[in-house]
Image (spheres, grey):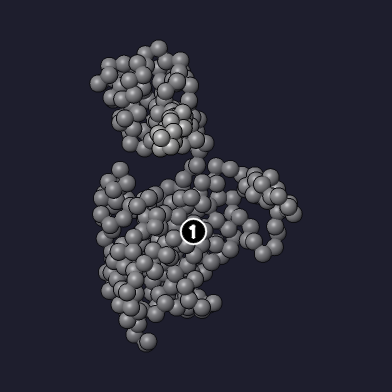
Amino acid sequence: MQDLAIEIGMTHVEVPYLYPILPIDASHNRFVIDHNRCVLCRRCVRVCGEIEGAHTWDVMGRGHKSRVITDLNQPWGDSESCTSCGKCVQVCPTGALFEKGKAVAEMTKRREFLPYLQSLRED
Amino acid sequence: MGDKAIMATVWLDGCSGCHMSFLDIDERLIELADLMTLAYSPLVDTKDFPEMADVTLVEGAVSSEDDLAKIRKVRAHTKTLVSLGDCAVTANVPGMRNPFLTEDLYDRAYIENADANQHIPVNVIPPLRPNSYPVHQVVDVDVFVPGCPPSADTIFYVVSELLAGRQPDLSGRSRFGA
């Protein structure tokens, strides 16, 4: 996407940045949306409606107040239409939608097998 | 020396990575040295900005009163001003503080996270502006070179073109974050 910006000659942003503090919804048990990273490309809206057929995602508000929402602007975790298929996460180009447990601090380590490896060496 | 172009580089609120990338031009710097004199830069000793620089590269966002005074002076004494790198072009990492109040930043840095001698410095360290700004939001900028940092090849291309009196075409050469 950044390459595309340069290709069409957009080397900088002329309007002043607003630096809003936007919410993060981590209510879904597998996925998170960080609105601070969302560029409103609406790929999640399309893949959810047109491929998965659930139409959980939509857009609310106008102009710079637009946000993608789940169901009727309810927490994602409370959504009854979401099938947890994860297609929206896969198509998101900015990482606004991401899977829980992937960050280093969140990883669950399974160290049980380490003593086993060591015992094999000792034998 | 007489017919050589005068060049300068300025380091505002940035990590110096763009200057490092400039140095990464390596032996081609000798080629550039035939075309220009580096009259002012963190890389040279001169303390005063030249009367009129042909090309000035600016690294970093405008974050403090000192940055603001510096960039205004540089703009007044530069023909072609280049925003070099993502901090100069977008405020980038320095701009990450912008959603927060400056008082809260000072508090966090000098009181909350200080082990000893907790106080907010009033001398020596220039006071912060309310926000970190991209350079073009403060003064007019002629050329924008995104990248974190822009590659040595990109910087060499831009400087060579400008010294040859041409406008560099950046399409496909660098982008935000690259």
Measuring from the top left, give residue B59's x and y in whole percent: 45, 62
Q: Residue drawn 32% across and 20% down?
A: A85
Mark 1 chain: B
User: What x and y, as percent, mark residue B34?
Assistant: 32, 81
Up the image or down, A113 lies above or below A49; here it is below
For this orientation, the residue located farthest to the top is: A80
Q: Residue at x 40, y 75 (%)?
A: B7
Pick whichever, B51 or A72, lies toward us: A72
Q: Position of residue A51 (x, y in %)?
A: 25, 21
- Residue that label 1 marks: B15
Label 1: few (<14), some (14–19) or many (≥20) C-alpha neighbours in 10 Å: some
The quarter of the rendered structure image containing the N terminus of chain B is: bottom left
Image vertical order of residue A109 relative to residue A51, above or below: below
Q: Residue at x 50, y 35 (%)?
A: A105
Residue A62 visible in the displayed image: no
Q: Residue at x 38, y 35 (%)?
A: A95
Residue A53 horizontal side relative to residue B16, left or right? left
Q: Position of residue B69 (x, y in %)?
A: 56, 65
Residue lying at the far bottom of the rendered structure: B2
Q: Is residue B71 above or below residue B177?
A: below
**B144 on left or right of A26:** left
Quadrant in the rendering for residue B136:
bottom left
Say which of B102 and A113 sits in front. A113
Along the line of sight, the residue nearer the viewer: B31 or B6: B31
Determine if residue B15 is in view: yes
Name the kind of residue labelled 1 in the image: Cys
**Which structural element holds mark 1?**
loop
